[in-house]
């Protein structure tokens, strides 16, 4: 049995992950970690008696093999370090790690000879959108990104939008986009700017997770869009990660690298 700890087990994604682990042959949920718990009795979370419940990182004592993380951008760095330092393979879905933090945890994982995965998006439609957008950007250097999420989302832009911009930036020909004399009469109206790529973040009830990448060229346009209508869409990728992470030799970034 592969033993799994879920950080953020009470949250929207954490709950989906709990069900995934419980329904998956060969996996056992051994622990749940969430900051705001009011009880340490697993029954209060409809979990079996053997599942340990933690509310503080420093309390955690576990023999888990895998650490699945769906917490908060403010918590994910400390959590990832903790997992690696304790020999637990991290599967990190939480967004918000900076490039420097990713490098640091990769170095730490390498020193411990521990594999893991950081994926800004576990949904197949988003992974494919990023791949297609990177391809299109070679031919359409004029591009903007619109990401749309539920209104409980803590961070903006989404990790997926930022990853999309980084992938486009890798291949986009050197390019000055838009009117150099443009002004904003309403602050922020042109969105965030990642190396000249504008990102617009929409937060609305009813939405789950959606992204459009808009390319424009002389007399034509290309729009690539993905929609996660249900958080179940992320569980296919989480299961792929669970199935592969014990065999990985390094801390990999991006689900596409283990598919
Ligand atoms: N990679 C992917 O495919 C996806 C990634 N995400 C990302 O996952 C993260 C979680 O999203 P979502 O489930 O919607 O968020 P929720 O707010 O629903 O859940 C957050 C969870 O984290 C817990 N938590 C909060 N602070 C801490 C802390 N300091 N230490 C430990 N646990 C903590 C919360 O517990 P409590 O309420 O008790 O504080 C709760 O269980 C976000 O970063 C989001 O962007 C989301 C969807 C897909
Ligand atoms: O908070 C969310 O919901 C999501 N977060 C991830 C992100 O920031 O990209 C993945 C997906 O967009 C859902």
Image (cartoon, rainbow, N blue to C red):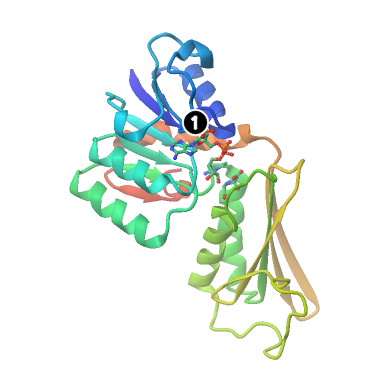
- Mark count: 1
Above or below 171: residue 89:
above
Label 1 residue near ligand 1, CB within 8 Å: yes
Residue 87 sits in quarter: top left
Whether residue 185 sits left or right of residue 54 in the image: it is: right
Give the structural element (helix, strand or loop) at label 1. Answer: loop
Whether residue 103 sits left or right of residue 238 in the image: it is: left
The residue most toward the front is: 38
Which residue is found at the position 61% from the left and 62% from the top?
Answer: 133
Above or below 10: residue 170:
below
Q: Mark 1 points at which residue?
A: 36
Which residue is found at the position 34% from the left and 22% from the top?
Answer: 3
Which residue is found at the position 24% from the left and 50% from the top?
Answer: 108
Whether residue 62 sits left or right of residue 168 in the image: it is: left
Q: Where is residue 86 in the image (x, y as percent from the top left)?
A: 24, 35
Q: Position of residue 7 (x, y in %)?
A: 43, 33
């Amino acid at each position: 049995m592969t033993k799994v700890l879920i950080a953020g087990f009470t949250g929207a994604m954490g709950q989906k992950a709990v069900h995934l682990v419980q329904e998956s042959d060969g996996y056992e949920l051994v622990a749940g970690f969430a900051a705001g718990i009011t009880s340490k009795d697993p029954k209060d979370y409809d979990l079996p008696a053997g599942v340990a419940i933690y509310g503080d990182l420093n309390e955690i004592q576990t023999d888990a093999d895998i650490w699945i993380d769906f917490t908060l951008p403010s918590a994910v760095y400390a959590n990832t370090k903790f997992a690696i330092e304790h020999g637990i393979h991290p599967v990190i879905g939480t967004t918000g790690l900076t490039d420097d933090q990713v490098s640091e945890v990769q170095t730490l994982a390498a020193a411990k000879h521990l594999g893991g995965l950081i994926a800004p998006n576990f949904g197949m439609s988003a992974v494919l959108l990023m791949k297609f957008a990177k391809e299109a950007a070679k031919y359409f250097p004029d591009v903007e990104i619109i990401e749309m999420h539920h209104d409980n989302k803590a961070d903006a832009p989404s990790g997926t939008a930022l990853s999309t911009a980084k992938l486009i930036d890798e291949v986009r020909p050197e390019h000055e986009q838009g009117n150099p004399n443009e002004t904003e009469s309403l602050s922020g109206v042109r969105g965030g700017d990642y190396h000249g790529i504008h990102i617009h973040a929409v937060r609305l009830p009813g939405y789950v997770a959606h992204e459009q990448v808009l390319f424009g060229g002389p007399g034509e346009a290309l729009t690539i869009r993905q929609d996660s209508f249900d958080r179940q869409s992320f569980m296919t990728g989480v299961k792929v990660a669970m199935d592969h992470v014990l065999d990985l030799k390094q801390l990999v970034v991006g689900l596409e690298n283990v598919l």
